[in-house]
Image: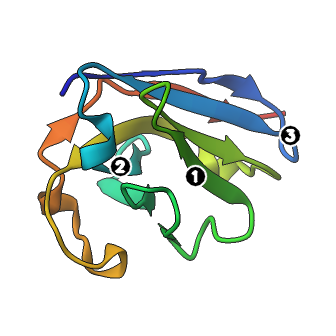
Amino acid sequence: VQLQASGGGLVQPGDSLRVSCAASGRTFSSYVMGWFRQAPGKGREFVARISRTGYSTYYANSVKGRFAISRDNAKNTVYLQMNSVIPDDTAVYYCAASRVNKPIVQFVANDFGYWGQGTQVTVSS
């Protein structure tokens, strides 16, 4: 599967932004999807992931209650709705796909074998 992230940009603290990730191929629904981010000078950080059907989601504590991951299997797209953004949300956001079978709460970054190119999100006043 090939992944293409889009929708990043410059926003002010407290604003909302939705980033999207479009996947190629006809088997999108067979992948668990995730969002990760990497801030300048820092390592990659998990943000959120969603099960194949979209019924189960899991979030990093740093974004829980502010971000929402969703997917539209008919459109081969996964979304990350970012609300009440803060400067610490500034990062390149990457989408990733996994074909590993395990409960959504048990996934780790290495379970994701397919990665998109990233989209920059900058939160600044």
> Viewed as shown, does residue 44 lie left or right of 40?
left
The residue under label 1 is which amino acid type?
Ile
Give the alpha-carbon distance from disc 2 to disc 3, as whole Å: 25 Å
Q: Which residue is mark 3?
A: 15
Residue at the image point whose x is 36% and y is 55% from the top: 52
Q: Which residue is mark 1?
A: 69
- Which label's residue is closer to the chain start, 1 or 2? 2
Give the alpha-carbon distance from disc 1 to disc 2, as whole Å: 9 Å
Are the residues tagged 2 and 3 within 8 Å (C-beta)? no
Quadrant location of the C terminus in the rendered image: top right
Numbered circle sitting on residue 12: none
Residue at the image point whose x is 73% and y is 69% from the top: 65
The residue under label 3 is which amino acid type?
Asp
Looking at the picture, how far across and down is residue 63, in whole percent? 62, 64
Quadrant location of the N terminus in the rendered image: top left
The residue under label 2 is which amino acid type?
Met
Are the residues tagged 3 and 1 within 8 Å (C-beta)? no
- Which label's residue is closer to the chain start, 2 or 3? 3
Looking at the picture, how far across and down is residue 58, in whole percent? 48, 71
Give the quadrant of residue 94: top left
Q: Which residue is mark 2?
A: 33
- Judge whether residue 108 can be spotted in this image: yes
